[in-house]
Image (spheres, helix red, strand yellow):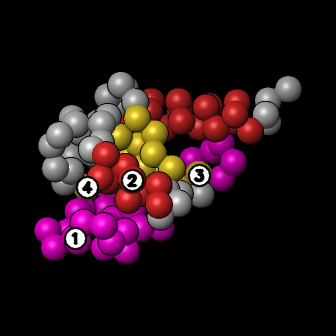
C-alpha cells in the first residue's frame, strides 16, 4: 500500500490552504514502512485528474486540511483522505496506520 502525506519540506505536513509543493509517499506493508520517496507537485497538474498528481498510485492521502472539491475528487477516485492536526509526517502516518488497524479489527 502507498500512502501520500502533503509536505513542502519532506518532513512536516504543510499548512492547510497552501498549495503543496510535494508529497512524501510511503510504501507500507501491513503496518510497517518499507520505504518512502518525495514527489514534487507538477505545475501543470490538472485538477480533477488524479493521474497528473504525485500520489496517483496511492490508496490514501494524509493532510492537515482540504477543500470539498478536492476531497470529493479523491474519494470518487477511491483514495482515502485522512485529516490530522499532527505536524510531523511520520507521526501522522503512525496515527493513520493505527486507526486502520483498529477499524479493521486486526488487533486482539
Q: Residue at x 79, y 34 (%)?
A: 105
**What are the residue bounds of the magenta stretch?**
29-57
Q: Residue at x 69, y 48 (%)?
A: 30
- Give the labeled residue for mark 4: 22
- Give the labeled residue for mark 3: 28
Of the two numbered discs 2 and 1 on the same chain, state the one appearing first in sequence.
1
- 102 vs 61, left or right, is right
Query: Which one is in front in this view, the residue at disc 1 or the one at disc 3?
Result: 1
Of the two numbered discs 2 and 3 on the same chain, state the one appearing first in sequence.
3
- Give the labeled residue for mark 1: 45
Label 4: element kind:
strand
Compute the Cα span from label 2 to label 1. 17 Å
Label 3: element kind:
strand
Q: Residue at x 37, y 26 (%)?
A: 86
Compute the Cα span from label 4 to label 3. 19 Å
| Marks 2 and 1 close (CB-CB < 8 Å) | no
- Give the labeled residue for mark 2: 72
Q: Is residue 53 above or below residue 103?
A: below
Q: Which residue appears farthest toward the right when viewing the image? A: 108
Q: Residue at x 25, y 55 (%)?
A: 22
Residue 49 drawn at (x, y percent)? 33, 72
For label 1, count other residues whose C-alpha is less than 10 Å away and answer few (under 14), some (14-19) or many (20+).
Answer: few
Compute the Cα span from label 2 to label 3. 24 Å
Query: Which one is in front in this view, the residue at disc 2 or the one at disc 1?
Result: 2
Query: Which one is in front in this view, the residue at disc 2 or the one at disc 4?
Result: 2
Q: Is residue 70 above or below residue 89?
A: below
Amino acid at each position: 500500500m502507498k500512502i501520500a502525506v502533503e509536505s513542502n519540506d519532506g518532513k512536516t505536513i504543510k499548512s492547510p490552504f497552501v498549495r503543496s509543493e510535494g508529497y512524501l509517499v510511503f510504501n507500507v506493508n501491513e503496518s510497517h514502512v518499507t520505504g518512502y520517496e518525495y514527489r514534487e507537485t507538477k505545475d501543470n497538474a490538472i485538477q480533477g485528474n488524479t493521474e497528473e498528481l504525485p500520489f496517483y498510485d496511492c490508496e490514501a492521502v494524509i493532510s492537515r486540511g482540504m477543500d470539498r472539491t478536492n476531497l470529493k475528487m479523491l474519494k470518487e477516485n477511491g483514495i482515502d483522505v485522512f485529516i490530522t492536526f499532527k505536524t510531523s509526517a511520520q507521526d501522522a502516518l503512525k496515527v493513520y496506520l493505527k486507526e486502520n488497524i483498529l477499524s479493521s479489527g486486526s488487533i486482539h
